[in-house]
Image (cartoon, rainbow, N blue to C red):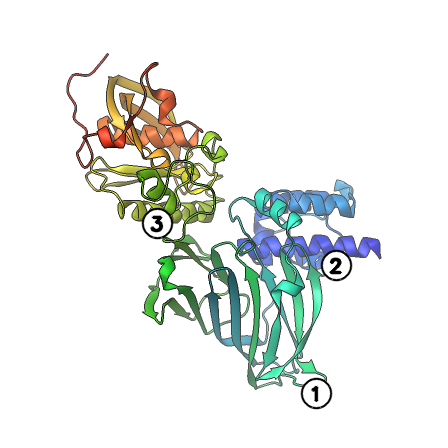
Amino acid sequence: MADQALAEAFVAELKRWRDVRGLSQSALAARVGYTPSYISKVENQQQRPSREFAEAADTELRAGGALRRAFQALGARPRSEAPARQHAAPEPSTSLTVEHEDTSLYYDGSTYKATQRRQLYNGGSEPITSYLIRISVDRYPGDPERSNAHYRENPLTWEEIGLSASIDGESIGWRVQHDRDAFKELWLLFENEDGRYPLYPGESAWLEYSYTVGEEKWGQWFQRAVRLPTQRISVQLDFPAELAPAVWGTETTMTATGGPFRNPIRSSTEGGRRVFSWSIDEPPLHARYRLEWKFRAKTTKEPNLNGTADTASGRMQAIGIVQEGDPILATPARLFSLPDEAEDARRVVAELNSAADRAAGVHNFGKGMGIAAPQIGINRAAAIIRTPEGESITLFNPRIIEAGGGFDEQYEGCLSFFDVRGMVPRPMSISVEHTDIDGQQRITIFERGHARLVAHEVDHLHGELYRTKMRPGVEPIPVSEYRGTGQTWQYGQVKP
C-alpha cells in the first residue's frame, strides 16, 4: 500500500507539471525520447518509471526537482530496465467533444473564484458517467523551486477550495484521484444520492464546477489547455475596477511557439468592476491559452524602504517596482534556457512592458528608460530598454564582453531608488552578447546613450546598482536638485 501511494504521488507530480507546461503525452514523449505509450503506462501505473525517465521529465518540464524527489521516494530502478526509446506516435482520439467551454474568474480583492462550464457531447457508442478535472496552482510561475517550497509550507486544501459541481443543473459528487500540495485531480461523477445522470450517445449536457483559492496561493495567471476536440472557448476575468487591471494573453500550439492571442481581449467597466472577455473558435488540440494580469493601482505589501507614495521612489513602489534593500536586487538573475523556456521568457517580457507602461504613466523619461526582471520581483535574466527615439530593445542573458570609445560621466536615475540621481561613468561603446528567443547567440554593439541605458540594465541582471559604478567620494544628489528631468543626455568631450 505504501508503494502504491508513492507511485500515485509520482504520477500526480508528472501530470501536474505536464499540465503546467501544457504538454500532451506525445509532446513530452518527443522531448524526452520515449513513446507516448510508455508515458501513458506510467500515468496509468501499468509501468514503473525509470530513473532516466524521471530525470529527463524533470528537466524538460522544468519541475524544479519535484519529479526527481518523487522518484527518489518511490525508489530507484536500474537503468538497464529502461525501455528502448522509439519515435513518438499520435495519442488515440476520444469520442467525447466539447461544444463550448466557458470560464469565468472573479476576484474580490483577496480571493479568486473560478467557474468552468463545458457543454459536452458524447459522439461514441457508450454512456459517459464521469469526467476528469484538474485544479493546479502556481504562485511563482517561472520559479518552480520557490513555488514548490511555498506549497510545501502552505498546501492547497479541500476546505478552502469549496468545490461544487453539477450536470445540467443536478448537483453531483466526485472521487479524488490525486491530492497534492498544489495540484488536485478528481473524477466528477454524474450521480448523486437521488439518481444517476449518464451522458448517453448522441446527447449533450452542460457540466459546471467552481472552486475558490486565496490570492496568497494563486499566481496572477489563468490557463486553459485543449485536451479534447473543442469547438469554442470563452473566458471572462472580472476584477475590481479600482485596481486598474491590465490583462494580456499568449497562446502556444503543437506547431508554433508562444505568441500573443490572435483575437483581441475586450474589456468593459460597469458597477465598479472591470471585465475582460476573450474567445476563440475551433482551437487546435493541445493548444494552450494563458491570460495574465497586473493590478496597476495595488500597492505592494512590503514596507516602503524609500519614503511614502508622495516621493518619487514611493510612486515607483506603488506601481510594483522593487525597491533598494530587497535581496533580489543584489542577486545575479537566473539565465534562460532558450528556446526551451521561450514561453516563460515571453511572459517575463510582457510583465516588463506592463511595468514600463505604468512607470511612464507617473514620470516623463526624456532620456529613455529600462527595466530589468529583478526590479519587478522576477529573478530571471531579461530586461527591456526604451530609447528616447522610441526604439524597444529586449535582452535575454546579456553580458558585456567589450567596452571602448572612452568614458563619459552623466547623471542616471534608477526606478528602485528614484529619489536621487547619481553621476555615473560609462563607456561610450559596449559589445553585448545575448540570446535571442529562438536560442541564437548574438553580439550587438550599443553606443552613447543607448550604451548607458543597456549597461545600467545589464548591471541589474548581475546584481549591481549604479552606486557601485560611481567614482569614490561621489554621492547621488536628491532629485530636487537635479535639473535634467525630461532632457536627453548631452555629449561633449569624451574622457579617454
| Residues at marks 3 and 2, CA–CA distance in whole angstroms | 44 Å
The label on residue 45 is 2
Mark 1 or 2: the one toward you: 1
Q: Decide if residue 443 is in sight here.
A: no
Residue assigned mark 1 = 195
Residue 222 lies, in percent from the top left, at 48, 60
**Which comes before the other along the chain, label 1 or label 2?**
2
Residue 360 lies, in percent from the top left, at 27, 45
Q: Residue furthest top?
A: 496
Dot 2 crowding, Cα within 10 Å, few <14, some 14–19, many 20+: some
Q: Please determine whether, in this image, residue 236 is positioned above or below residue 245.
A: below
Q: Which quadrant of the rendered structure holds the C terminus?
A: top left
Residue assigned mark 3 = 354
| Residues at marks 1 and 2, CA–CA distance in whole angstroms | 31 Å
Report the front residue among 460 and 341.
460
Q: Please determine whether, in this image, residue 459 is positioned above or below residue 144.
A: above
**Which comes before the other along the chain, label 3 or label 2?**
2
**Quarter-of-image position of residue 485:** top left
Dot 1 crowding, Cα within 10 Å, few <14, some 14–19, many 20+: few
Left or right, residue 446 beside residue 322:
left
Give amino acid for label 3: Ser
